[in-house]
Amino acid sequence: MLPPTDLEGVADYADQLPTPDLAEIIDGPWSMLLGSDLRFPDADGPRTPELQQAGEYMDAFRAAAADDPVLVTALLRALSLVDPPSRLRAADLRERAARALALSWPG
């Protein structure tokens, strides 16, 4: 069935579309946004140790991504919702970020 060309029949067409579990789709991006918001002192919400750890990891990941095209591509893909945010915690990217930070660490 083709979509209607006017507003008449839009509801009938929309009812026929597959509806994935929206909570599953938006959970990762929502968590990323929430974590960013809660870094501001005036934002309301609980600041759990897990959230603090995730924020520290993302700070380190972004610092490493500044000089690494693979990391910045992964970051942009997650921020653009092409890949799930969990991709940024994959072992290969964690190791690459750690190596990049170790190479750039002064001392």
Image (cartoon, rainbow, N blue to C red):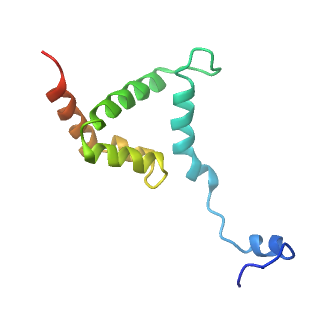
Above or below, comparing residue 81 to residue 7 in the picture: above
Q: Exactly how many numbered labels are in the figure?
A: 0
Please identify the quarter of the rendering in which residue 11 is found.
bottom right
Choose between 11 and 71: the one closer to the eye: 71
Quarter of the image for residue 90 reads top left
Quadrant in the picture for the N terminus: bottom right
Work out whether residue 48 or residue 99 is closer to the camera in this orientation and state it.
Answer: 99
Quarter where residue 102 is shown: top left
Report the side of 19 relative to 64 (left or right): right
Residue 44, position as x, y percentages in the image: 65, 20
Image quadrant holding the C terminus, namely top left
Q: Residue at x 41, y 45 (%)?
A: 86
Q: Residue at x 55, y 35 (%)?
A: 33
Q: Is residue 31 left or right of residue 96?
A: right
- Residue farthest along the right direction in this orientation: 8
Could you say where residue 91 lies in the image, as x and y percent from the top left? 26, 43
Which residue lies at the image location 73% right of the left edge and 75% below the top edge?
Answer: 16
Q: Position of residue 63 (x, y in %)?
A: 31, 30
Q: Estimate the x, y position of residue 74 in percent, counting from the top left.
A: 35, 48
Above or below, 98 against 21 in this view is above
In the image, residue 76 sits, relative to residue 49, either above or below, namely: below
